[in-house]
């Protein structure tokens, strides 16, 4: 690592927020624009999103869902149909008041989420139990008028998918809510190598208009938590507000039971903060736009470049392979592809050609080793799998290390003063206690995990009888 | 074709506009919403768009372009930087004036196109000839405040891709403009089976802010033309307005030369109006979400359903295959999948099982024939290719039939009074003549085709010396 390089990026231990900003800029993931709070997703950042999108879209289709596209604008009167929903979203929507030269008779909001648009459509197309279930999804942009913004984590506009489904019964809808939370937790763990905690949000933290919200929560490098994706059981609240009715199997008119669930570009921020280090981005191989970067050594020497390109061709069927044959210094290249988080560097120079080998360097561990050309494919595939598994393992271990159980508010405060982390503590179910905890510690309830444990017999705040074990943390 | 069915759809000869509306609704491509002028793209319509998108995205990447994502909003001051551009777009943009409860200090327009956003970003990231070319593309939604709207053809919001590139020289940029027009014409002809005319727009019809605009134009069933995609050479107009400068190979500061090009959901409307008939949609096999629909005959009889499903499995590696084993009447099913434009129907019943055959019915010709199980794969692949080729051939023949050359304005008017069609006529290059022609005939200049012919020595309007042969038509 050259000195010049080290000066370019803040150490995460010194200033985590600045480290994050440095990484998203220097790894060329985003650029700022004159639109406050909006980001430009640059090619490298967008390739990462495309890889995630392709994988998630496949899993959404495999679970029986169909993609549709709904309008960007929502008339004010439509947004107001479901009371909790409008109350939750009104403070953070952008309003279109003029079209061309004319003032509109009714304001249009730029969708912050599309429950009401789906609600209106479902009313039109659902009439009988034969029309159910309806399992729709859309990939789109949404806008929320955030005051403070950070690339990927919180932006005025973001990209996401939002699923919206209708079912005959509450049981079926709850099963769907669980199934999609599972899809999210699996793509986080299997694809993004991000360990998650699955659980239910408290009433205070649930989606505006939902009966309940399931969530997958993950822990960042700095000990703060991030809500990575959510899946909501909506009950029949929207169905009643929009009149989505069907004739059931007994010939009786009923409201459908609904769900909605979303996964956003935010997850890229999570990936950066879970895997990144002081040399920059670290990408899990499954997500990485380039999995193996070939750097020819002493490339001016005869045969080196040809050989390097032949390796690239040879590997292109088993991995996403890049090559940098520019005339930049090797030191610059090493740093650059470390910054970009490319999982595996492959060096090949005259000596390697002679010995019929290449040198591999792992981004996650820094391990450097030679591999004979004969076993190249096997070793590359094996190493990429190992990197994927190791990133997950490291993140999981960190999460375990950074989780502390507490039984009283004093300990709760003390532990968080030592450093951000996940706190496990019992809770009585009363939102007054949530508020006191937030005020005294800065931590919010992240979720009531599906895997419950008994830590103590009393609520960590009020000492009354416990209802649940809850994960708490300061959060993004 | 059952009578009940015929009553459901207007004949295109009676009322083409109503026929179009019937098809987009009955083939479940779109639904209307309470958002004026915006459409809901339903699963079947969206699958068509996804198939087009996957193919076009592949071709855009193969020609060296990278995907990015730019913000939805454009501050008013940014939009105003290029004068022709703002003049062209100001009357048709939607304005956001409030965020949450607050009035904004500066209005934001919802992007009608993103030249200015790319302009601002390019200024930040381009400094040297080494940074060029920059070949970016984005898939997004855009908004244009249209007064009169029709699904796919003209909507307040539509989906598209917009390419934006920067080059060192004018020659390179013009080459890019041509290359992307070629990508568009090829995807129209090879994939969508839509024959196109390639040419240049007149100055009056060019993109607001462009030096010139290339276009691919196609002819609908009713003799009206449709601008299917455009590719613009922007020169250095935006580069000067935004200060996109680079140090060239001689160390001198220069403005980049730019292009932009777009392809939209409008093409689905073109496909409907080029291939559709009085029984509904007709989809080219390459685009069709379902290429072969299997209908089991007498499916209650033993073995029929199992056999039908085994055929489905067998074919799934060579085609997108569906099966309808619902208890609906065969007549209903025949009509339904004709309405949906499925290229090939496969019927299989007890007699076919006995004879080790299936029955195939072509959507495009109505031809019905048996195929032995032994040659099933070969025949299906062959027939799908034939359908694809036939749709293109029929459309091409219709275009030839519906093209007339005229040498004077009276003939021009008379020919168009007989029925809509493409008119070939010479033009002096003066926009005054374009305006007169439009006023007297209702036709606009579609393009100055690359393939020029000499039809007469004088302008069809003013009798002055000719500059170009031009295609004219009433247009969508």
Image: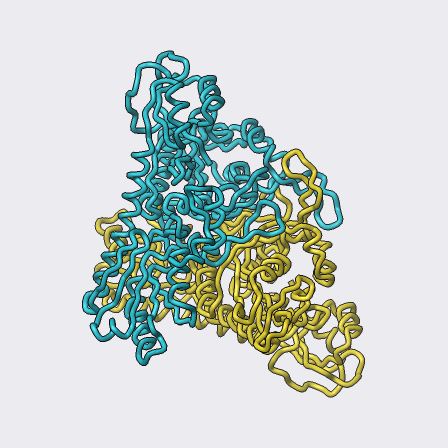
Chain colours: A cyan, B yellow
From this viewpoint, is residue A448 visible? no
Depth order, front residue of A55/B366: A55
Q: Residue at x 44, y 40 (%)?
A: A262
Report x, y in % for residue A255: 47, 29
Work out whether residue A282 or residue B87 is closer to the camera in this orientation and state it. A282
Name the foreground residue: A173 vs B169.
Answer: B169
| Left-right relation of B354 to A25 | left
User: At 46% across and 67% down in the image, what residue appears?
Assistant: B59
Provide residue A162's location: percent of width, then percent of height. Answer: 46, 42
Viewer can see residue B443: yes
Horizontal side of A374 relative to B242 (left or right) equals left
Above or below — where is B156 with respect to A373? above
Could you tell me residue B229's position as x and y percent? 58, 66
Quadrant the N terminus of chain A occupies = bottom left
In the depicted structure, whether residue B372 falls above or below residue A110? below
Above or below, comparing residue A393 to residue B61 in the picture:
above
Dividing the picture into quadrants, the one containing residue B399 is: bottom right
């Amino acid at each position: 690592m050259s000195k010049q390089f080290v000066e370019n990026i803040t150490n995460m231990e010194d200033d985590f927020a600045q480290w994050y900003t440095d990484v998203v800029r220097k790894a060329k993931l985003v650029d700022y624009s004159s639109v406050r709070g909006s980001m430009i997703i640059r090619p490298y950042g967008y390739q990462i999103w495309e890889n995630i999108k392709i994988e998630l879209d496949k899993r959404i289709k495999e679970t029986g869902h169909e993609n549709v596209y709904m309008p960007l604008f929502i008339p004010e009167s439509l947004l107001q149909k479901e009371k909790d929903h409008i109350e939750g979203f009104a403070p953070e929507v952008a309003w279109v008041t003029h079209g061309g030269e004319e003032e509109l008779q009714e304001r249009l909001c730029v969708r912050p989420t599309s429950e009401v648009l789906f609600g209106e459509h479902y009313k039109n197309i659902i009439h009988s139990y034969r029309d159910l279930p309806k399992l729709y999804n859309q990939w789109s942009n949404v806008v929320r008028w955030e005051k403070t913004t950070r690339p990927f984590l919180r932006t005025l506009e973001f990209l996401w998918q939002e699923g919206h489904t209708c079912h005959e019964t509450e049981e079926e809808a709850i099963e769907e809510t669980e199934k999609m939370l599972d899809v999210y937790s699996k793509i986080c763990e299997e694809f993004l190598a991000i360990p998650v905690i699955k659980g239910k949000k408290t009433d205070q933290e649930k989606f505006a208009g939902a009966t309940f919200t399931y969530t997958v929560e993950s822990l960042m490098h700095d000990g703060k938590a991030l809500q990575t994706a959510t899946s909501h059981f909506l009950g029949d609240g929207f169905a009643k507000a929009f009149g989505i009715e069907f004739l059931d199997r007994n010939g009786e008119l009923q409201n459908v039971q609904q769900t909605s669930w979303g996964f956003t570009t935010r997850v890229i921020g999570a990936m950066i903060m879970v895997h990144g280090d002081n040399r920059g981005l670290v990408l899990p191989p499954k997500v990485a736009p380039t999995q193996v970067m070939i750097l020819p050594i002493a490339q001016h020497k005869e045969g080196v470049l040809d050989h390097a390109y032949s390796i690239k061709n040879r590997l292109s069927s088993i991995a996403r392979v890049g090559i940098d044959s520019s005339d930049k210094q090797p030191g610059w290249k090493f740093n650059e592809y470390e910054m970009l988080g490319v999982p595996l560097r492959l060096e090949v120079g005259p000596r390697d050609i002679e010995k019929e080998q290449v040198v591999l360097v792992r981004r996650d561990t820094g391990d450097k080793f030679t591999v004979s050309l004969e076993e190249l494919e096997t070793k590359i595939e094996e190493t990429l799998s190992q990197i994927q598994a190791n990133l997950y393992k490291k993140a999981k271990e960190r999460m375990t290390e950074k989780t502390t159980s507490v039984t009283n508010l004093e300990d709760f405060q003390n532990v968080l003063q030592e450093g951000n982390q996940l706190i496990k503590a019992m809770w009585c179910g009363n939102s007054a206690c949530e508020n006191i905890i937030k005020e005294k510690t800065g931590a919010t309830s992240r979720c009531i995990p599906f895997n419950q444990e008994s830590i103590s017999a009393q609520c960590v705040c009020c000492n009354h009888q416990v209802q649940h074990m809850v994960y708490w943390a300061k959060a993004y």
